[in-house]
Amino acid sequence: MKIREIKVGSALTKSGLPDAKWAVNPYVGCVFGCKYCYAAFIGRWKHPGEEWGEFVDVKINAPEILKTELEKLNKKFQNKDSGSIFFSSVTDPYQGIEAKYQITRQCLRVLADFGYKGEISILTKSPLVCRDIDIFKKFKKASVGLTITSIDDEVSQFLENNAPPVSLRLGALKELCRAGIPTYAFVGPLLPYFTARADKLEELFTELKESGVAEAYVEHINLSPKIRQRLFEYLAKTPELISYFKKAQTDEYRQELEKIIYPIAKKSGIKIIGGKILHHGK
Ligand code: SF4
C-alpha cells in the first residue's frame, strides 16, 4: 500500500450527481479496492501502473482549502443555501487511514463551524463513520448512508476485499439510528447470483428494517466496459460466476429484477429513495 500526502488547489468540486451539488473527496484512491468500483478509472490516469486499492493520496490541506472556498461561496450565494455536499463521490471518506489523518472529520468541522446551510450527505462502507456523530449533530441537515450489498460477510469480503465486513456496517447503521442521525442504506450494486434474487433480497431488506433504516437507494450493477474488464479479470478465478454477471447486462434482466424488488421493499416498509432503482451505464 502506497500512502502519499499531497496538497490540492480545491476541495469542493461539482458532483455531477442528481442528489448533490458538490462533492468533497478527502482522498485520491481507496484502500477498500472493491472489484466493481466505478472510480477505479482514476487510478489509470492519476496512478498509471498502480492497482486500484493499493494507493491512497491524502489531501492534507483539504480542510484549509475548503474554508477558503466556503467563504467565496458565501459571497456568491449571499448567505443562502448553496446546495448539498456529498462525501464522497470517488473515494470512501472513512477508509482506514481516516482514523489517522482525520481529513474527513476536519472538513466536516470546517463546514459545521462555518454554519453551512445546505445538506451534508455521507456515504461509506466503514463503521468509523460513527466516530463523527458529534459533528453530524451540529448540522441542520445531515444524513449518513452505509453501503450494504449483501448481508453475508463472506460475500462482502469476496468483492469488497478490504472493506469492513457488512455485519459491522449494519451495526453502524443501528448506532447512527440510535443516535438520532438520519440514515439510509445504499443497496448497490445489486450483485448477480449473490444478492439479486428474491430470497436474498427478502433477507437483506428485513435486516435493514431491523437496523432502524427507513430509506434506501437501490442500484443496478454498472457493467460499463472499464468496470467489466477489471471485474471479469477478477472473476476469472471463479468462472462459474461470470455467466451470472454477463446476464445482468440486459434490459430484460433489470426489468425482471425490478419486478421482484419493489414488492419486497414495500413489504419491508423501506422506502426506495427517488421511487426507482438507479442504473448508470450499460
Ligand atoms: S468503497 Fe467505494 S470508492 Fe472505495 S473501492 Fe469501494 S466502491 Fe470504490
Image (tube, rainbow, N blue to C red):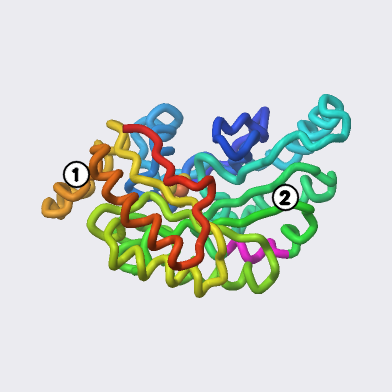
Q: Counting other residues with Cα less than 10 Å from the Cα at mark 1, is it few (<14), some (14-19), or many (20 or more)?
A: few
Report the residue at 57% width, 71% height from top: 212
Residue at the far left: name it.
Answer: 240
Residues under numbered marks 1 and 2 in contact, where contact means CB atoms less than 8 Å apart: no
Is 88 positioned to the left or the right of 191 in the image? right
Is 184 positioned to the left or the right of 147 in the image? right
Confirm whether the magenta stretch covers residue 129. Answer: yes
Q: Which residue is mark 1?
A: 247
Is 35 positioned to the left or the right of 248 in the image? right
Residue kind at label 1, given as amino acid type: Lys
Assign a secondary structure to mark 1.
Answer: helix
Q: Front-most of 29 and 2? A: 29
Q: Is residue 2 visible?
A: no
| 105 vs 222: above or below | below
Q: Front-most of 253 and 238? A: 253
Quadrant of the snapshot with the C terminus: top left
Assign a secondary structure to mark 2.
Answer: helix
Question: Number of numbered discs present?
Answer: 2
Report the residue at 38% width, 44% height from top: 37
Is 218 positioned to the left or the right of 127 in the image? left
The x, y position of residue 40, in whole percent, is: 39, 38
First to last magenta residue range? 128-133
Q: Which residue is mark 2?
A: 108
Q: What predominant SS class does the magenta segment belong to?
A: helix
